[in-house]
Image: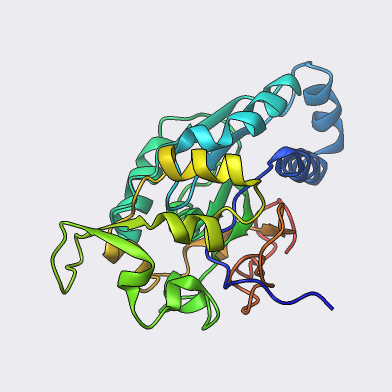
Amino acid sequence: MTRPGPPALLPTGRRPAVAAILLAAVALVLGSLSPASTVHAQEGGPGTPRPTIVLVHGAWADASSWSKVITRLQRGGYTVAAIANPLRSLSGDAAYVRTRLETLTGPIVLVGHSYGGAVITNAATGNPDIKALVYVNAFAPDQGETPTALAGPDSALSAPDPTTVFDFVPNTLPPTPATDLYLKRATVFASFATGLNPQDKALLAATSDRPPSARSTSRPQPRPGGRSRRGTSSAPTTRSSRPPPSGRWLNGPAPPSPSTTPGISA
């Protein structure tokens, strides 16, 4: 019998399956539009344009983490934009992403990974061009919930002593809302990069730790921003050291939505 591993944090790893999921999501979006327009769009004719796929990364990552996914989507003929998530606060990050979305024209499929799921839930508010929200191993908090709380008691995020998980910058206790949370090397190996081999884990620990502020994952969801859009959640794309304890932690239901906007049904 296999012993359970250490508590999961925010798994990362191989992303080919993510691109396949996104391509399937886009196909569903196109299928929800006018059939005649969809045929024209898929054949490159004058009709409903293909959606721009906008990717929003999570904590301890940056936009380059989507590079392999972007390559595959571009090969499929899609316009892709990976937004640099500031990781400063949930409301501020959502506002930043929202302003970036306002520079785009045409239909949009908005994708969030990990903490990015909470961001897109808010950033989608008021933008009629967003046809679907896609949650890839992502948080989809309801109003008043925090990403940290959704991680559940078995997550490294819920460790009783956060100094065993993070290096605080600045290194003062107690941390303030503006304190940056760097993952300790041991945390990367045991709870973050659980789908990678030791060599890749070491590389990730050295290069990819873009820290969030303490306030970004601990402030409650300000509004049910994604409820006006259809959404989908994807299956985990890499092995985690332990199954997610909460249904809305890694692979949770997208926020419920009415049928007023075509897109992907939850």
Q: Which of 234/38 is in front? A: 234
> How many marks on residues?
0
Q: Is residue 168 left or right of residue 208?
A: left
Q: Which of 134/101 is in front? A: 134
Compared to residue 251, the image places residue 133 above or below, namely above
Q: Is residue 37 visible?
A: yes
Point out residue 225 in the picture as x, y percentages from the top left corner: 47, 63
Q: Is residue 237 left or right of residue 130?
A: right
Point out residue 85 in the picture as x, y percentages from the top left corner: 39, 44
**Residue at 75% across / 60% down in the picture?**
265
Locate residue 261: give its quadrant: bottom right
Point out residue 11 in the picture as x, y percentages from the top left corner: 59, 57
Compared to residue 137, the image places residue 162 above or below, namely below
The single residue placed furthest to the top in the displayed view is 45
**Residue at 21% across / 60% down in the picture?**
179
**Residue at 66% across / 46% down in the picture?**
197
Which quarter shows the N terminus?
A: bottom right
Q: Which of 237/48 is in front? A: 237
Q: Is residue 219 visible?
A: no
Q: Which of 217/123 is in front? A: 217
Coloring scheme of the render?
Answer: rainbow
Locate residue 181: give its quadrant: bottom left
Point out residue 239 in the picture as x, y percentages from the top left corner: 72, 58
Compared to residue 76, the image places residue 182 above or below, namely below
Q: Is residue 230 left or right of residue 211?
A: right
Which quarter shows the C terminus?
A: bottom right
Locate residue 180: give its quadrant: bottom left
